[in-house]
Image (spheres, rainbow, N blue to C red):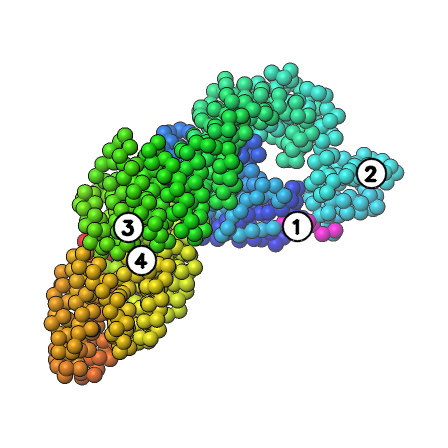
Amino acid sequence: MILGRDAERAQLAGMLAAAAEGRGQAVVVRGTAGIGKSALLDHAAGLHGARPLLRVTGSEAEGDLPFAALHALLHPVRRRIDALPPPQSDALRAAFGQGPAQGGDRFLVGLAVLTLLADLSEDEPLLCLVDDAQWLDQASADALLFAVRRLNAERIAVVFGVRGGERPFPAAGVADLVLTGLDAEHSAALLAARGGEMAAAVRDRVVAEAEGNPLALIELSGMLGPEERAGRLPPLTLYVEADTPAGRVETAYRERIAAFPERTRILLAVAAAEGTGGLGLILRAAGRLGAGAADLEPAEQAGLVRVGPTALAFRHPLVKAAAYRGAPLSTRQAAHRALADGLVWADVEDREGAEDRRAHHLAAAVTGVDEDLGLLLERAADRALRRGAPAVAASVFERCAQLSEDRELRARRLAAAAEAAAAAGQLDRAGRLVVRGTRLTARPEVAARLAGVTAALEFEQGNAAAAGRIAVEAAGTTATTAPDQAVTMLGAAAGYAWFAGDGEVLRRASRLMEIAQQHSDVSLGAVPSVVPSVVRSTEFLLSGDHAAALELLRSSLAAVGSSTPADILAATCTVFAALRTGGDTEALVAADELTRSCRAEGRISDLTHALQLRTQARILVGRFAEAEADAAEALRITDAIGHTRRARTIQGVLSLMAATRGDAEGCEELARNGVDGGLAPGASWGGYALGLLALGRGDHRLAADRLAALRAGPVGHTVIVRFALPSLVEAAVRLGEPDRAAEPFARFEGWARNSARSWARAVTERCRALLAAPEHAERHYLAALDHHERATRPFEHARTLLLYGEWLRRARRRNDAATRLRAAAKIFHGLGAAPWFDRAVTELAAVGAKPRGTAPAQAVDELSALTPQERQVVLLAATGASNREIAAQMFLSPRTVGYHLYNAFPKLGITSRTDLSRFRRA
């Protein structure tokens, strides 16, 4: 019976009904111990009936065991894992210790959970209940929350129960249902429903002491004897000193357990220490301490435990807490040692998992230094990393450090803990671990690892300059002793320094790269050589030596050839190298390959970066619809995994597309987010966007001022700002200030000459036409259009056509002007560049003409009516991919993919999947 929870029961019933209709639901039921969370979860199970149900209860004892709770939740459906897409099934088996662990992406397990749950809900709605979620190991919590945030069109409901006052359980994006105490009327009704006479004064005292806590009402009243209930003796149970009703109940439980025989108390302490209720292990361990199954009888008769054929369950978590915390330290330590011994002989499916449990029990039994145990735990931490549980690994590495007296060994383990914490997104914790490790070590290699974490944290906080200095200093200490480590760190240092415009750091990184390569035992090979090439070329670019930089980048791209490095740093450098040379096609090919690789291997964290790079390349080549779809997917993932700074960078990139389309409000918001993100990519794209927005509106003064400030500012050295220089030239010329255009033109012209890209040569000629005397302008416009015929960047082509058309109109060559302006209008229309299209139409009207053939030229533009996610699904479906294959690529469930297609078909005016073929891109 649940009293006083009508609103909560109605909310759960509504959730289950919505889930049954294909609208996935999730809620976190929060409240203090005994407030009724588990009762509500039981109520939900009852409403769900005989339909599929998965349930697990978090265990404090398993808080540092990777994926322990997830394994228990999915154990009943473990045979369905083999039906998952290979990367997902491999990741889930590895997480459960049933397959090789390769240190994969920690979010891939979450995707596997989503796919598995979606498969289970195909025929009937599925309900998942997770009680005591505050005790979930972090790896399980992350995986479940990743899946829960993507339920969308699934027939799935998930209910978490979380006890307040214990370990936090943050669940951003999931609704909370907070339980408070029952009012006095419902409290009295609950007591009455439990039966038995009780004097009014005693009842009122119980109600007051319980503070509306149902468990306290039941347990405190149940502990009263007949004379106390009648009011003839004082109710001593109600005078227990504690801060909360739950505290009073736990204290009362402790007193009841204290009255049991010693062997019963020992057995209960062993069961509480074991944590999962495995009866076989509990009895084996208790037997080592002189207790046996018969000693459970007093606790069973008192109703504090329930014992089945294979499991022991405490009546309530507070009973377990009382059994453990009420036992002396020596008893608790002995219990953990006995459990560790029992695990040596355990016949278990997951042998590595048993080793992890054994190590943790041994750690709980030790209060000082134990070098052998430290090694055992370190192996457990390494396994957690390989399984994709960095948060768990961080905790275990930190415990390892406590078990050693050797300062350097402690420092090395703290470095590993800091790296794992950073990988898990626990940035504050990583910083604290770095401080502790740095105080201990005198070894350059360990200090460099710690410094690498510090540099990454500084960069994440927007301080790229400090990150570059820290990274290059650390690499300098290991260039000869640990050259491979130094090369990786120098690649990161160069990236930080480029974002900060720090030439000194780049020069040092370039020199150190040569030293590290000379001392490396392993040849870097052609593909990874792109990293040192980018480091050196970045130095040249920042110093203004474009010729040397671009020659080096072109040679590194030639060495890479058609293959893209799998390593994220090398792959990123490959795309950067292409972008810096103006190689749009090469950049898009490399970004495409990197994106495919990340999808195929399930590297979700890296995928957001790959999608950002591909978004940039697609915007530059005018594939706006696809760029928007990529960005939407990347933003959805960054939101789920907490990559806030990456999201801001992507928003900055998107602002340029918004500027092109004339979306002033959207452009300004996106650009502001990009600039506020504190990193050069977002700030440079955002700054360029704001200048282009003003130019498109015809506000040449504002455009020139914005672009000049961008050029002179902290991101003025970046390649995107270099791409913005022709717009500054145009704004200055239109203002009648050609002298203001001289320096930016010279910079762009020098870069374009060295890049040898057709689009760059075309834009250079356009700038010359603007700066030339009227009688000499036409030859430059014609030269520009000749280059455009062999170039990418349709938006730049259209701008050249527009300017040339305006020049022809002023020269009174109306027919020639109309031809060029119609061509410009057609391209602008296809790109959705509204203000530029309007300018072309206005110019056409001035020569007595109208635009013709402005319907979108490519089928992909028909997708403009779709949401970004629908567009991405349609484009993948057009390749012939099945819903299941699309789901694996987009980190959705197959049902959600089907939902998006269902919504997209009527918008596109099609009725079958075969009609999608026309949207397939070459």
Report x, y in % for residue 667: 37, 66
The image's mark for residue 425 is none
Mark-to-mark CA distance, 1 and 2: 26 Å
Mark-to-mark CA distance, 1 and 3: 59 Å
* Residue type marked 2: Pro
Per the image, the residue denoted by label 4 is 717
Query: Circle 4 sits in a helix, a strand or a loop, which is it?
Result: loop
Q: Main secondary structure of the magenta part?
A: loop
Report x, y in % for residue 462: 43, 53
Query: Which callout, 3 or 2, points at the residue further toward the start of the chain?
Result: 2
Picture residue at 82% right of the left edge, 36% below the top: 236
Query: Which callout, 1 or 3, points at the residue further toward the start of the chain?
Result: 1
Mark-to-mark CA distance, 3 and 2: 79 Å
Above-or-below relation of 18 to 280: below
Per the image, the residue denoted by label 2 is 235
Picture residue at 62% right of the left edge, 46% below the top: 31
Q: Nearer the viewer, residue 469 or 152?
A: 469
Is 180 one of the magenta-colored residues?
yes
Above-or-below relation of 280 to 804: above
Per the image, the residue denoted by label 3 is 538
Report x, y in % for residue 776: 13, 75
Picture residue at 53% right of the left edge, 52% below the top: 175
Name the mark nearer the viewer: 4 or 1. Answer: 4
Mark-to-mark CA distance, 4 and 2: 79 Å
